[in-house]
Structures are given as C-alpha cells and as structure tokens.
Image (cartoon, grey):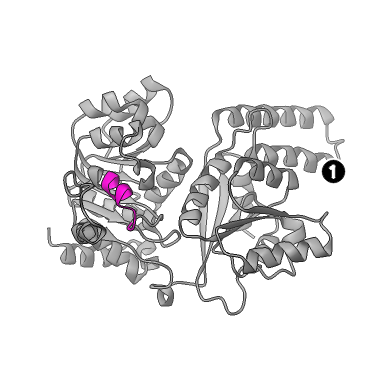
C-alpha cells in the first residue's frame, strides 16, 4: 500500500469534516496506516480517537479492513460509536451490547467494525478466539493491559488478528514491564524482560509515536473541547426511566397547575440521576472520570471538575481515594477559598479541585489546570464558559482540554441540543 498516495487521496476527498484535522493528526493517521503493529501514545487531548477513526475508514475503503474490532473502557463505547459515525459514516458499525446471547449474535452479524468493552472481551473470549481472524484489533486506553499476567491482558492476546494498534495517553515509554505487556499484544516476541531500557526504546521505535501538547502547540487552538457521550449504567437507567415516567404522570395529573419551581425540581431529580444512582452509587460519569484521572496521574497533571451540585462533588471525592482532592464550594470562608486556590496553583500535581459551578464560576485564577471536566450541564452556555475561563488565563503556555460529559437519551442530551440552537 502506497501510504503517501492514500493519505493524499483521503485529504482530497469531499468530506468536510476532514478539513478540521491538523497536520500532526495527519502524521498520526499515516503512522497507523503504515504499520501492522502501532502504539499511538499522544498526550490526552490530541485526538487519538479521531486519528484512529479516519485511519479505520481508510482501511475499510482500501479493502484492507473487512473485520475490525475496537476495544475500549465501557464508559467510552458510546463515544467511539459516535466518533466513528462522524469520521467514517459509511462504515457498517455495531456497538456490542446486551447479555451473552445478544453479544454472540452481534459478533456474528456481518458488520465491518465492532466496538466492545474490555469487560465484554474478557467475558466472551472463548467465542472471540474461535471467530474468523480480525484484520485489525484496536485497544484504546491500552494501559488496561499493562499487567501481563491478568486475565484481561491474556484475553486480548488471544483475539485472532492480522494487525494490532494500541492507544494510550498515559506515558509508558519508561516502564519496561508495561511496554512488554502491551507489545505482547501488538508484536509478540519483540520485547523481553532481559532488555535494558535503551534496548527497549530502540526496539519499539518503529512502532511507537508520542506527541505532547507543547510539541504541537502552534497547530492547536487555545481550548480543545471534547463532548464525551456516555450511556447510563443499568441501575441508573432503571432509576432514570422510573423518574421520567413518574414525572410525565405527575404533569398529566396536575392539569397545568404545577409551578416553575415544581418543574425545576423534577428536572433536577433527573439530572442528579445522570450523575449517580443514589442507592448503589452507580455512575457512568464516574467511570469516565476515573479513566481521565488515570492519565492525569501519570502525567502529574491538575484537573478541575465542575458540578452544580455539592453533594455530587462530595460523592466524587469519596470514590477517588488516594489522591490529593479538594472541594471548592460556597460555604467556605474567604480564607479557606484562598488556601485551596493557592494549593492548586502552587503545589505539584497530580491534584484535583472539585468546584461548585456557582461558587467557582467567576473571579478565580486556576490557570495551573491541565484539563477541565464539566461533570453536568447547565442551561446557560455563558455560565459554563465562565467556568472554563477560570483555567484559560493570560500567560498560559499550553492548550486547555475541556471535556463535557453528556449522557445519551436523557435530559442532558436535550440540554445539549438546546444549547446548539441558541
């Protein structure tokens, strides 16, 4: 395959979305297309998913990718489906869902690309290992298999494949054991434990590409916004649908006698269920946040997490143990607020500051943040923008990544659609 010619052909295609890609992303696409084994390890926020989706689209069109499996954390499956639908809309795609029998049916249907979670792969490996060989298997957040002896790493290595790509925003190049496990999937036999670190680097060099934001700074906008689509967990969905049905029944029975306050209370209950299921603590958002935090820790970064609800922030802090986490909210005194801001700005990472949208939306300088997460959405985009601007301050040298969680088929998706049309 003449990759240079194919890249030129892709760039000249009539897809308007391709004009949004930056030069370093085209370099990443070429890197993937040129290799059967590849580890794309760009820093979080540089668009590994986008580069991979465009490369997959090219493989399918070249008839080099008749069967492709994308494996990712469960919290990212919906996002992968949406990204592939956007960047490769002509591909016949299936996001694997349901119980064991449903998943078995999905894998046997004649699609070009399947998106499955790591948990599904581990549960279904007996089936997958007997399936026809995949032309390509992609592992997103490949640090999930960094421990070679785990059942998950073993399952991934058992998937029959011709080509293998791995994506990771976590720096792994100086961790021989991690690299040995990942390359046992990518290119078995390339690495072994007796190698020195320089020997390891030399061996992986043809298959390894890592860029950080500073390297590509001139090509990047000052703020990189990513809308991360999520699916409610099973118990969350049950609770949400029940609340939704109760709300519709209440509106019908009230015959228009409810107040704006009553309606806002109903909406708030739905929005809170998008954050957490109260009895079990289930949360699709927390699962996604944990993946982001994992990369943040490895890069010694600093993260701002905004929510409208202090109780949500407290719940996040309870779950994310073992990290330096503070909560900034309206009950704090001026001195306490100043201390938290100084700690976040001046002390080394990794650090997380959980911020109430109302208390921290204006007047703060939190420019040390590596990234911002909007854990839940607000009706007024100006309020969200004010929160983002706390980190996007004068003198900032690196782009700011902003991740907005949006739960599909919920009030949050409706809020997002309303904001698009403002």
In this rendering, does residue 140 appear at all? no
Which segment did they paint magenta? 173-182
Q: Residue at x 18, y 43 (%)?
A: 188
Tally of numbered discs? 1
Residue 355 horizontal side relative to residue 79, left or right: right
How far across and how far down the image is residue 335, in percent?
81, 64
Tell me the quarter of the image containing the C terminus. Answer: bottom right
Taking depth in this image into account, of 403 and 397 the one nearest to the observer is 397
What residue do we see at 48% from left, 50% from top?
294
Is residue 249 shown above or below 12?
Answer: above
Residue 204 sits above or below residue 82 on the image: below
Snapshot quadrant of residue 34: bottom left
Residue located beneath label 1 in the image: 261
Can residue 422 be seen?
Answer: yes
Residue 415 located within the stretch drawn in magenta: no
Q: Residues within 10 Å of mark 1 (few under 14, many from 20)?
A: few
User: How far across and how far down the image is residue 55, in percent?
Assistant: 27, 55
Picture coordinates of residue 190, whole percent (x, y): 17, 49
Q: Viewed as shown, does residue 410 lie left or right of 182?
A: right
């Amino acid at each position: 395959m003449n990759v240079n010619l194919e890249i030129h052909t892709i760039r000249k295609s009539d897809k308007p979305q391709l004009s949004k890609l930056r030069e370093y992303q085209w370099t990443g696409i070429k890197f993937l297309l040129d290799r059967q084994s590849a580890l794309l390890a760009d820093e979080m926020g540089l668009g590994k998913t986008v580069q991979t989706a465009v490369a997959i689209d090219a493989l399918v069109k070249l008839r080099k990718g008749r069967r492709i499996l994308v494996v990712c954390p469960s919290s990212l499956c919906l996002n992968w489906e949406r990204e592939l639908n956007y960047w490769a809309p002509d591909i016949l795609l299936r996001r694997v869902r349901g119980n064991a029998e449903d998943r078995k049916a999905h894998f046997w249907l004649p699609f070009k690309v399947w998106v499955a979670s790591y948990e599904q792969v581990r549960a279904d490996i007996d089936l997958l290992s007997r399936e026809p060989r995949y032309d390509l298997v992609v592992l997103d957040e490949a640090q999930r298999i960094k421990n070679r002896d785990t059942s998950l790493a073993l399952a991934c290595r058992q998937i029959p494949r011709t080509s293998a790509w791995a994506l990771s925003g976590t720096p792994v190049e100086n961790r021989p054991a991690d690299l040995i496990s990942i390359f046992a999937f990518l290119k078995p036999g390339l690495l072994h434990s007796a190698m020195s670190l320089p020997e390891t680097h030399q061996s992986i060099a043809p298959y390894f590409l890592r860029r950080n934001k500073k390297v590509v700074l001139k090509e990047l906008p000052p703020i990189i916004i990513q809308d991360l689509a999520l699916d409610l967990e099973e118990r969350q969905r049950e609770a949400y649908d029940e609340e939704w049905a109760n709300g519709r029944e209440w509106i019908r029975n009230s015959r228009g006698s409810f107040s704006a306050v009553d309606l806002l209370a109903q909406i708030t209950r739905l929005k809170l269920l998008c954050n957490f299921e109260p009895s079990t603590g289930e949360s699709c958002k927390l699962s996604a946040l944990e993946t982001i935090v994992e990369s943040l820790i490895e890069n010694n970064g600093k993260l701002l997490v905004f929510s409208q609800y202090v109780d949500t922030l407290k719940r996040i802090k309870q779950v994310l143990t073992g990290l330096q986490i503070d909560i900034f909210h309206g009950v704090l005194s001026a001195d306490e607020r100043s201390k938290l801001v100084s700690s976040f700005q001046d002390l080394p990472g990794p650090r997380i500051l959980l911020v109430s949208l109302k208390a921290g939306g204006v007047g703060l300088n939190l420019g040390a943040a590596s990234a911002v997460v909007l854990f839940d959405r607000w009706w007024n985009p100006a309020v969200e923008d004010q929160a983002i601007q706390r980190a996007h301050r004068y003198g900032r040298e690196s782009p700011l990544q902003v991740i907005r969680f949006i739960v599909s088929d919920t009030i949050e998706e409706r809020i997002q659609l309303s904001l698009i049309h403002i």
